[in-house]
Amino acid sequence: MIPLYDDNRTRRFPVVTVALITTNAAVFVAQLLLPRWGLTTESWFLLFGARPIELTQHVDLAPSEWVPWWATLITALFVHAGWLHVVFNMWYLWIFGNNVEDAMTRPRYLVFYLACGMAATATQVLAAPASDVPIVGASGAVAGVLGAYLVLYPRARVFTVIPLVVVWPVLELPAWVLLVVWFALQGLGGVRSYGSAEAGVAFFAHIGGFVAGMALAAVFATRGRRGRPLRARRRV
């Protein structure tokens, strides 16, 4: 399923969401220029990706001495494995992130996004603590945004493409239907990939980020589902 847009209007321009998309795009462009600098994509992933064995052993393995093991919890969120990886992540972030940002203050939203990303990475590490395969991508943090959207705007309508073999119909789905199905697919993928030593989709990161987003939504949001303040303001 590919969401196209939703009917959920925002009150203000999503500055943080746009800044995150711009930063991810800039890092990916820099990644494309690696050969000019004598670097390889593999070394880039090892340098900035989150390697479970480093995080569990609290060590910096070559060639990542430049970036401390703990810092990769953040840097990994801005590194992507390819065009489709970065485009789909940023597309989901644009569609759902603007509304989640609208429900929070901008500093809160940024902290929320990074916290979901780190929770997502931690979940993937727990699934394979001895792996040396770098975890990269914003999908865990974006999954957190999806989880928050489910909590804050479950009845919003999302226009979604359903890719079938011959035709690709566009359906207007309630957000909760789209997001529950998305989460179920991640869970199925996680079950099928558990115990595999091969690199691939970090399904457990998606699951961890989504659950973290649901749990943190009420903590970070300052406005309710209809844009009303969650906390009463005292009149002066």
Image (spheres, rainbow, N blue to C red):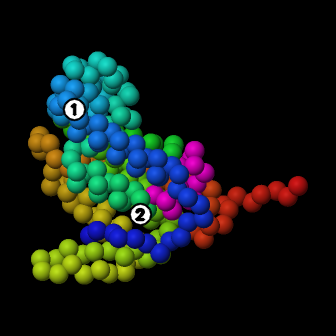
Residue 119 in view (yes/no): no
Helix, strand or loop under label 1: helix
- How many C-alpha atoms fall within 10 Å of the one at disc 2: few (<14), some, or many (≥20)? some
Q: Quadrant of the C terminus?
A: bottom right
Helix, strand or loop under label 2: helix
Q: Which mark is residue 95?
A: 2
Q: Which residue is mark 1?
A: 34
Q: In terms of depth relative to the viewer, which is nearer, 203 or 17? A: 17
| Residue 125 percent across, percent down from the top left | 28, 38
Q: Quadrant of the N terminus?
A: bottom left
Q: Earlier in the sequence, mark 2 or mark 1?
A: 1
Q: Which mark is residue 207?
A: none
Q: In terms of depth relative to the viewer, which is nearer, 119 or 93? A: 93
Q: How many marks?
A: 2
User: What's the residue type where badge 1 is placed?
Assistant: Leu
Verify whether residue 187 appears in magenta. no
Verify whether residue 106 appears in magenta. yes
User: What's the residue type where badge 2 is placed?
Assistant: Ile
Region in magenta: 97-109
Q: CA distance from mark 2 to mark 1?
A: 30 Å
Q: Are marks 2 and 1 in contact (CB under 8 Å)?
A: no
Majority SS type along the magenta span: helix
| Residue 200 percent across, percent down from the top left | 16, 47
Q: Which residue occupies 37% across, 76% down?
A: 159
Residue 7 in view (yes/no): yes
